[in-house]
Amino acid sequence: MNSIALLPHSKHILPGGRLKLVISRVCDIRMVTEAMANNHPFALGMIAPNRSPETVTNIPVIATVVTIVDFNTRDDGLLEIMVEGTDTISVSSLTMAYDNLLTAVYEPCHSWPTIPINADSQMLADKLNLLFDSVPEINTYYQHPNYNNATWVCQRWLEILPIDIKHKQSLIHHPTAETTIHFLLQLLQDHNLINN
């Protein structure tokens, strides 16, 4: 039986993604301190933007294991960490500690294999590149963006698009990124972003 500390969060991350988190709750400070001291990962679970982590007693099944790649203390005294997604897991149950820290029992999930960008999916990479260029902070997260890998590109789109969590989970559950590629192309076409 595998178990891992889990942080419910409204910002979503998938393998290969990077995310900056501000840590303020006592239980999350404990989680991060233990993760750094023992060189252990923790997991991020998806919750909707209008949900508070304190009210979470269950999360969607698929979560992402993350490692801490950087940290610093902000001027206001709060801890800020940069995490990187490594693997997806399937959460079977959650338990809550005395300080509200969640621990998940889980099984490993499949990893999406690499799919090279082709003529059909090139537009997804180009649009993502333009989007990242327009948001300097996100652009600095990735020193070596992998725009030649359609799987990496799709994972970044799923992280940032305001898609319903159930739909995101359904797409992630597929064995490859092919379904997500078709979904994203249709989404951008429906919003007239194909040739803009």
Image (tube, helix red, strand yellow):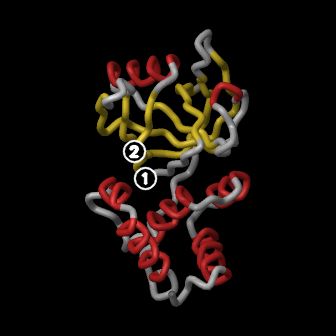
Q: Quadrant of the N terminus?
A: top right
For the view shown, which residue lies furthest in the front direction? 76
Residue 48 x %, y %: 67, 45
Residue 21 x %, y %: 44, 38
Report which quarter residue 86 is drawn in.
Answer: top left
Query: Quick check: 153 left or right of 140?
Result: right
Image disc number at residue 55: none
Q: Is residue 157 above or below residue 109?
A: below
Of the image marks 1 and 2, the number of the one nearer the N terminus: 1
Q: Residues within 10 Å of mark 2 (few under 14, many from 20)?
A: many
Q: Residues within 10 Å of mark 1 (few under 14, many from 20)?
A: many
Q: Secondary structure at mark 2?
A: strand
Amino acid at circle 2 = Glu
Q: Secondary structure at mark 1?
A: loop
Residue sitting at x 66%, y 20%: 95
Say which of 187 and 172 sits in front.
187
Report which quarter residue 96 is drawn in.
Answer: top right
Residue sitting at x 31%, y 30%: 75
Residue 88 x %, y %: 54, 45
Q: Is residue 151 above or below residue 15?
A: below
Count of numbered marks:
2
Q: Is residue 13 above or below residue 194?
A: above
Say which of 20 and 178 sits in front.
20
Q: Are marks 1 and 2 in contact (CB under 8 Å)?
A: yes
For the view shown, which residue lies furthest in the left direction? 143
Residue sitting at x 64%, y 80%: 191
Say which of 37 and 23 sits in front.
23
Residue for badge 1: 17
Residue for badge 2: 84
